[in-house]
Amino acid sequence: MASAMLNGAENLTLIGGINPKRLGFIGSDFHGRHFSKMGLVSCSRTSKGRTFLPKCSASAPRPASQPRFIQHKKEAFWFYRFLSIVYDHIINPGHWTEDMREDALEPADLSDRNMIVVDVGGGTGFTTLGIVKRVDAKNVTILDQSPHQLAKAKQKEPLKECKIIEGDAEDLPFPTDYADRYVSAGSIEYWPDPQRGIKEAYRVLKLGGKACVIGPVYPTFWLSQFFADAWMLFPKEEEYLEWFKKAGFKDIKLKRIGPKWYRGVRRHGLIMGCSVTGVKPASGDSPLQLGPTAEDVTKPGNPLVFFMRFLLGAMAATYFVIIPIYMWLKDQIVPKGQPI
Ligand SMILES: C[S@@+](CC[C@H](N)C(=O)[O-])C[C@H]1O[C@@H](n2cnc3c(N)ncnc32)[C@H](O)[C@@H]1O
């Protein structure tokens, strides 16, 4: 398993491997709204590696210029309406295996069976199956905006005692200071405003509680970047750390994960590429203030535009079904111990 732990957001040192060139840009979303140049981090060299220092806000909704056709809540809803039929059979074997899940949940420190745990964007319950190995199922709540995904979770025997509820990651139906652990795996990429979702993670945790967000990482290879940008949000590692830091988390850590047959290759991005954890240092709400939500899901959209976006997004996603197969073939062909 390819995994590595990176520490801290206060003065973040990443040991190579990250290209900060793409972090400052001017762009617009699909509707022509323009984002200002973000300048998310500055980069300087130290003897140990590159040091990234936060420069200004990363809290703009959808902090990137690319169209990302599956990024609105309704698009994610319809995407999973269909994907849920094959999700456990296609997505998990190629991108999110059981050993990756173990690797990613390890920093969540699920050390007590009596812990109250929320699994946000829990979908078909694949990650929850890993959680209930460590925590009593009756203490675990699975939340997702897709009833179709949740219907699959309800069929799984080990999850029978879990609470299963529909809800929105950016507006959680839990009281403040409620849970010991917040877990969210492979969902942040569909949240229109990831910073808002992480702020919610902070709010619902108890003092000393831990959030563990597992998600994609952005590719460095141009073709993979093209398809990633057309599909959904592939955050950069420093963006995760910035979101956690701004929400108020302390002791922030990022662990790199990936399928073992990739042999640590990250240039094509990864749908599950890192596990980011942070500890809530004080009770109450997050110190971060955000304005009203950017997305009004009740407003009717243009059905043709919606359909075209959906189609293009789903086509771009297909590329990431092929990549793990390509990597698997390379792993079979290239002698062990050599880079692929
Ligand atoms: C890739 S699946 C991950 C499912 C599960 N966590 C796992 O590990 O297999 C992403 C899930 O996030 C859910 N999702 C997307 N946007 C959401 C939102 N705003 N609130 C709650 N769930 C959301 C989708 O419905 C989908 O089930």
Image: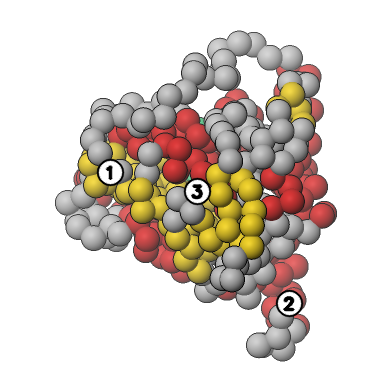
Badge 1 local density, few (<14 within 10 Å), some, or many (20+)? some
Element class at badge 3: helix
Q: Which residue is at the front of the view, 72 or 267?
A: 267
How many angstroms separate mark 3 from mark 1 (CA)? Answer: 16 Å
Q: What SS does tag 2 mark? A: loop
Disc number lying in front (3 or 2): 3
Corner quadrant of residue 289: top left
Q: Which mark is residue 4?
A: none
Q: Which of the two discs, 3 and 1, labels the residue nearer the N terminus?
A: 3
How far apart in space, not on screen, are marks 2 and 1 (Cα)? 42 Å
Q: Is 239 positioned to the left or the right of 112 in the image?
A: right
Callout 3, which amino acid? Answer: Leu
Residue at mark 3: C-beta within 8 A of ligand 1: no
Can residue 152 be seen? no
- Determine the CA span between mark 3 and mark 2: 29 Å
Residue found at x 59% / y 28%: 61
> Residue 103 location, x and y as percent?
43, 66
93 left or right, relative to 225: left
Disc 3: CA contacts within 10 A as few (<14), some (14-19) or many (>=20): many
Write down the residue under mark 3. Answer: 241
Location of mark 2 (residue): 340
Classify 286 as above or below 162.
above
* Label number found at residue 281: 1
